[in-house]
Amino acid sequence: MKRENIVQLLILLLSIILILFANYYPTTPSGDNVEKISINTVLLSIGCSILAVVIINFVEYHITLPEVNFMKVINSWKLVSIFKTRQEMNTVTNKLLLKSEELDIAALGASGFINYQGDVLKTRLQKGLKIRFLIPHKESDFIAQREKDEMAQEGSIKKAISDLVEWVRITKKELNLSDSAIQIREYSCLPIDSIMRIDSNLFTGPFMVKKKSQLTMSYQYKKGGDGYEYYKKYFEEIWNDDNITNPIELG
């Protein structure tokens, strides 16, 4: 038992003892028991006061304080939402993309994302949107393993990565974009978490076994909190590490 709980228990016992002692003294006044009634009142008052303090402390320590600490963590990390699936998350990201200025994505191809939001991205690119894609090397053994882990068709993730690179190449040429407007780098390490940063909002989630990427849970963090800063820094460290990443030439 924790020391705080032992102290509270002892104080509770003291209050009960005082209240029980108070019951030994009469409560009905008569000529010779006025002093005993006064003792009854004093003991009862002290006992009830101590009991009230114990109850307040119990509520604060076991109910209020944990709730306060929980909210401190939420506010510190600026956790905005938790989505059961990335499909659910997409309802939020799709709205943010309409006014996006910066977009960072670490994913395993993002074929569905390009199919549904490709036109929106092109429109935003023409208005100054900056995009960076961070993808695993398509020939990596980890990709073949990931296809098994999420029970995907053999070669599907590899194809999704190739399709993304081709989309970036065609889009850059079609819109006559500068090299800084849209960039793509590949890395050779284990696939990192799914990361999507849209301006001041960052979304991330794991890659799970026996779950396709779109059916995996995700978290949304807001700029200014520990979560946003943590994953933004993580993305930047991998992006800028020439030992594990290299740019894909787009022509």
Image (cartoon, rainbow, N blue to C red):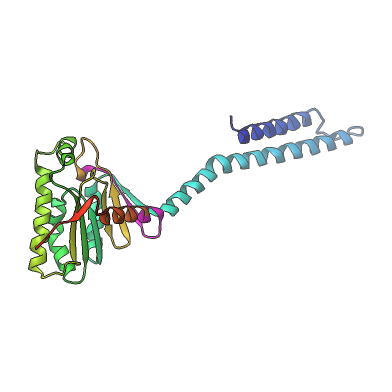
Q: Which of 22 and 219 is in front in this view?
A: 219
* Magenta span of residues: 214-229
> Residue at position x 20%, y 44% from top?
213
Quadrant in the rendering for residue 152? top left
Which residue occupies the foreground of this view, 26 or 125?
A: 125
Residue extending farthest to the front is 243
Q: Where is residue 57 in the image (x, y as percent from the top left)?
A: 62, 41
Left or right of 91? Residue 248 is left
The furthest residue to the right: 32
For the C terminus, the image quarter is: bottom left
Image quadrant where residue 38 sits:
top right
Please say if 12 is above or below 78: above
Q: Is residue 3 above or below residue 178?
A: above
Q: Which of 59 and 218 is in front in this view?
A: 218
Which residue is depicted at the point 16% across and 71% down?
126
Residue at image position (59%, 32%) is 2
Position in image of residue 56 (x %, y %) = 62, 42
Q: In which quarter of the image is the N terminus?
A: top right
The image quadrant of residue 178 is bottom left
Residue 230: x and y in percent read: 36, 53
Q: Does the magenta stretch include residue 107?
A: no
